[in-house]
Image (cartoon, rainbow, N blue to C red):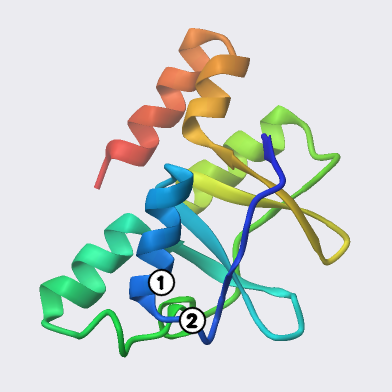
Amino acid sequence: MTPGAECVGAEESVLDAARRMTELSVGALPVCGTDKRLKGVLTDRDIVVKVLGKGKDPARCTAGELAQGEAVTVGADDDADVVVRTMAEHKVRRLPVIDGHDLVGMVALADVARALPEQKAGDLLQVLSGD
């Protein structure tokens, strides 16, 4: 897990989120509401496919518009098997890590690859790369 993940506010523009991703050298940001609760995750792919690819203006589109539905998360004390299972089940490469309702970090496929045996990491990558 990478601790201390920064949120982008649900009311902030996608353009601002993209700038923050660039500054932080990350491909995803958790989206938090004014109540500081996690609303979802915004990825660089979301920006390209759901905003730019559809001709929307990233300065007028908000991060919250793309963070619909309940966020898939893991708990701070969940073990690696839970993380792998959650990523595979939901076909996501990044997961917010929460402690109660507080965002405490992000776990990415790269974290899994570094922490687990090659076979397990490879199996997860195969699942995530499939249709």
Residue at image point 48% right, 9% down? 118
**Dot 1 alpha-carbon crowd within 10 angstroms: few under 14, some 14 to 19, many 20 or more:** some
Q: Secondary structure at mark 2?
A: loop
User: Image height check: is 107 above or below 56?
Assistant: above
- Does residue 74 appear left or right of residue 102 in this picture? left
- The spot of residue 89 in percent (x, y) is 52, 49
Residue at image point 38% right, 36% down? 127
* Real-space CA distance between mark 2 and mark 1, rounded to the nearest whole angstrom: 7 Å
Q: Between residue 13 and residue 32, name the one nearer to us.
A: 13
Q: Secondary structure at mark 1?
A: helix
Residue 107 location, quadrant = top right
- Does residue 18 appear left or right of residue 94 in this picture? left
Amino acid type at mark 1: Asp
User: Image height check: is 129 above or below 58?
Assistant: above
- The spot of residue 32 in percent (x, y) is 64, 74
Q: Please count the marks in the image.
A: 2
Residue that numbered label 2 is attached to = 12
Residue at image point 55% right, 16% down? 114
Residue at image point 36% right, 63% down? 18
Amino acid type at mark 2: Glu
Mark identifier at residue 16 = 1
**Dot 2 alpha-carbon crowd within 10 angstroms: few under 14, some 14 to 19, many 20 or more:** some
- The spot of residue 24 in percent (x, y) is 48, 46
Q: Between residue 73 and residue 110, name the one nearer to us.
A: 110
